Image (tube, grey):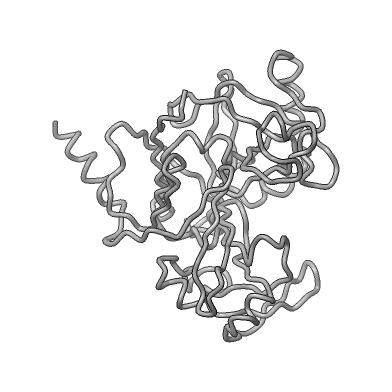
Amino acid sequence: MRRSILYLVLLGAAFGAAAQKLPAEFDHDRIRLAVPAPDGSTLKFYTDSGGGWNTITRAAAERLRLPQAGEWRDDDDKETLPLVAFPAFMVKAGVPAPSVDAYFHGQLVETAAPRLEYDGVLGSRWFAGHVWRIDYASHEVLADSDEKPAQGSHKIALGFQTADDGKRLRDMPRLVVTVEGRDIDMLLDTGAETRLTDASAPVLRAPAGSFIGASFIVKSILDDWHAKHPEWRFIADGDDTLGRPAPMIEVPHVTVAGFTVGPVWFAQKPDANFSEMMSSMMDKPVQGSFGGSGLRYFRVVLDYQKAMAWFEPTAASN
C-alpha cells in the first residue's frame, strides 16, 4: 500500500498546475495546430517532436505584422534568417510559447514555406520543458496537465542528449521499441510522415500524394525483416517523401512500454540518416523513428522536465 501511495504522489508531481487544451487537429495520425489569427485567418503549425527549429513562414509573419526580434546566422547554409516574436494571440489560444532559455530564446525563425499546407513548424524546442498529454484516439492534446496518468498506464524513461554536467543539450526524445524480442532504440517522432504513392495509397486508404503519420526504420533492419518474413505486407515503392520511391513494410506487432500493439507501418530510410545524422543529436545511437503509425494506439503523457513518459493503450490497440 505504501508503495502504491508513493507511486501516485510521484505521478501527480509530474504535472503543472493548469492544463491548456490546444487547438489541435489530427490528420492521418499527424498533429497540427489551427490557431485563429487576429486577421480572421487560421494559422496552422505542424507539431514535430523529432524536428529542430520553431519556424513561421515569411508570408504569415508579414501578413500578421509580427514584430522582428533580431536575426539568426545559419552557419551550415551560410544564411542569416530573421527572428520574430512568438505571437501573443497563440498563447491566449492555449499554445505554450517556447522557453526563453531554449534555442532562439523562445522566438520563431522566419523561413520560406516548406509546404503550402502549413504556416510553420513547432519542433523539439517547443516541446521542451513541458508535460504533454497526447490522446490519439480522442484527437486531443493538453499541455502542462495536472491530470494523473491512468492507473493502467506504464511508465518508461526517455533518453535525452546531455552534457557531462547533466545539462540538457537537445530535446530529441529516445525510447525503446521491441520487435520480435529485439530492442531497437528510436526517436519518439510525432512529426514522422510518409508521402503515399499510387502503390501505397489504396493499402493505406488515403489519396496518392497525401502525407500520413508514419514510423521509420533503417534499410538494414527493414531488409532483415523482409527476408525473414516475406508474409509481412511489403510495398517496394510505397513512400515518396524524398522524391524517389522507397519501400514500406507492415510489422504485425511491436512492444512499447510493455504493451504490444499493431500493425505498424515503417518506411525505409538510409542507414546514414540515423547512424550519422539523428544519432549525433541523441543520447544513444538510434535506428528509426516511432511516429504516428505506432503512437496512434496510445494515450501518451510526455514529461520533458523529468524525462519520463506514460503509455496507455486505447480502444484502437490490439
- Among the 4 quarters of the image, the one containing residue 7: top left
Please provide percent x and percent y for residue 149. 31, 42
Judge by depth and name the residue closer to the eye, 318 or 179. 318
Q: Residue at x 36, y 61 (%)?
A: 20
Answer with left or right where residue 104 lies relative to residue 14.
right
On screen, residue 8 above or below 184: below
- 247 left or right of 22? right
Residue 151 drawn above or below residue 69: above
Q: Residue 177: image x %, image y %? A: 55, 31
Q: Is residue 270 above or below residue 103?
A: above
Q: Nearer the viewer, residue 139 or 202?
A: 202
x and y percentages locating residue 262 in the rendered image:
54, 25
- Count of labels in the image: 0
| Quadrant where the image shows the N terminus | top left
Whether residue 45 sits left or right of residue 12 in the image: it is: right
- In the orientation shown, which residue stands out farthest toward the right? 244
Residue at (58% x, 54% y) in the render: 48
- Residue depicted at 43% across the width and 26% down the height: 258
117 up-or-down from 296: above or below: below
Residue 311 position in % (x across, y down)? 41, 37
Q: Nearer the viewer, residue 44 or 70?
A: 44
Q: Quadrant of residue 117?
A: bottom right
Residue drawn at x 80%, y 68% is 77
Examine the image and state in which quarter residue 225 appears. top right
